[in-house]
């Protein structure tokens, strides 16, 4: 009569056990809006998002809804910040796996040792050995990747300089330009926030944050912010592996030009708003 299709699924945890309460389930259109869904084939209204109490009261703990559409995105959050999102859900999918250990704020990587030394790299950017790769398919619009790191000068020659880059995929999200160390143990530090404005192969990223130098006990801080022209974000394909790395280029070849990446931390703040 109304031409509605029936959709149903169960939600199980990482061990395959059915989750029977404590979830909020949102049925979304492909552009992230709340979809119009119904409780039966004659268009009885159904609350969307489906709250934990409504979920607990469903027959056999199965999520059931009706719609004239053919595919949706399903987003699920629990009461302690865990979340998941399934894109392209359709009437043939009947089981969703919800990892209860995944929180909205996730420490993805923390270095437990210094990198190898970066020495004699004049004229070419050379990668530090500490890196981390994120699964780009798990990033969605509104997620924020927080990156903190520090470069430590072990030794240097005269007035030679180091140019430092921080890369996310193919995008240089920070380039310091030439920094002249003044004493052993000087540092360059950075604390960056990369907001995913658009996810996927046609991704858009916005970068903000700070970086600073501590050169012979003189600290100078700089602000990282997008220009007005970059308001829509930097174009970057983040549909696959997203490599985060740092690289440096010494201005001259000399055995005394030595530095390490002494810290690297990557935290992902998942957008839990449904």
Image (cartoon, grey):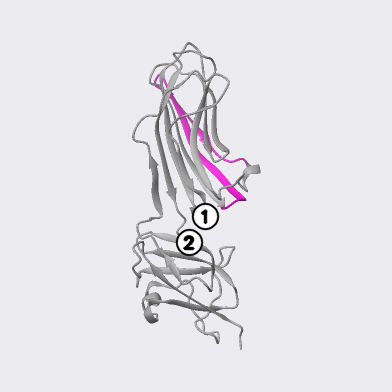
Q: Is residue 220 left or right of residue 198?
A: left
* Up-down relation of residue 109 to residue 63 (above or below): above
Disc 2: CA contacts within 10 A as few (<14), some (14-19) or many (>=20): some
Q: Position of residue 67 (x, y in %)?
A: 56, 78
Q: Secondary structure at mark 2?
A: strand
Q: Secondary structure at mark 1?
A: loop
* Up-down relation of residue 219 to residue 38 (above or below): above
Q: Identify the residue at image location x=40%, y=29%.
A: 115
Q: Position of residue 174 (x, y in %)?
A: 54, 34
Q: Which mark is residue 172?
A: none
Q: Which mark is residue 85?
A: 2
Query: Counting residues from the N terminus, which is met first, the one under dot 2 or under dot 1?
Result: 2
Determine if the magenta segment contains residue 212.
yes
Q: Position of residue 138 (x, y in %)?
A: 48, 53
Instruction: Single out the residue that lies furthest toward the bottom.
Output: 1
* Up-down relation of residue 117 to residue 25 (above or below): above
The Cα–Cα distance between marks 2 and 1, rounded to whole angstroms, is 9 Å
Q: Identify the residue at image location x=59%, y=47%.
A: 237
Q: Nearer the viewer, residue 52 or 136?
A: 136
Q: Is residue 140 left or right of residue 51?
A: right
* Up-down relation of residue 232 to residue 16 (above or below): above
Q: Quadrant of the N terminus?
A: bottom right
Q: Which residues are magenta?
A: 199-227
Q: Identify the residue at image location x=45%, y=13%.
A: 255
Q: Position of residue 8 (x, y in %)?
A: 47, 76
Do residues under tags 2 and 1 come within 8 Å of each other at their CB atoms? Answer: yes
Residue under pointer 1: 140
Q: Identify the residue at image location x=60%, y=51%.
A: 201
Q: Nearer the viewer, residue 259 or 81?
A: 259
């Amino acid at each position: 009569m109304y031409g509605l299709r029936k959709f149903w699924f169960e939600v199980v945890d990482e061990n395959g056990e059915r989750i029977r309460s404590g979830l909020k389930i949102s049925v979304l259109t492909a552009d992230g809006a709340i979809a119009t869904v119904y409780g039966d084939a004659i268009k009885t209204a159904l609350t969307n998002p489906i709250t934990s109490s409504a979920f607990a009261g469903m027959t056999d703990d199965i999520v059931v809804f009706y719609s004239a559409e053919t595919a949706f995105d399903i987003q699920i959050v629990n009461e302690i910040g865990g979340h998941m999102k399934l894109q392209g859900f359709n009437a043939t999918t009947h089981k969703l796996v919800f990892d209860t250990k995944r929180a909205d704020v996730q420490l993805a990587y923390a270095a437990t040792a210094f990198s190898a030394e970066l020495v004699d790299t004049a004229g070419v950017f050379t990668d530090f050995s500490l890196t981390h790769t994120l699964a780009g398919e798990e990033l969605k619009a509104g997620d924020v990747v927080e990156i903190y790191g520090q470069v430590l000068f072990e030794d240097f020659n005269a007035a030679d300089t180091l140019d430092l880059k921080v890369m996310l995929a193919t995008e240089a999200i920070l380039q310091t330009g030439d920094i002249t160390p003044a004493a052993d143990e000087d540092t360059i530090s950075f604390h960056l926030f990369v907001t995913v404005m658009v996810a996927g192969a046609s991704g858009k990223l916005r970068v903000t944050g700070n970086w600073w130098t501590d050169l012979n006990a003189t600290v100078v801080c700089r602000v990282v912010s997008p220009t007005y022209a970059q308001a829509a974000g930097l174009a970057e394909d983040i549909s696959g592996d997203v490599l985060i790395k740092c690289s440096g280029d010494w201005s001259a070849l000399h055995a005394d030009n030595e530095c390490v990446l002494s810290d690297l931390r990557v935290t992902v703040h998942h957008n839990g708003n449904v």
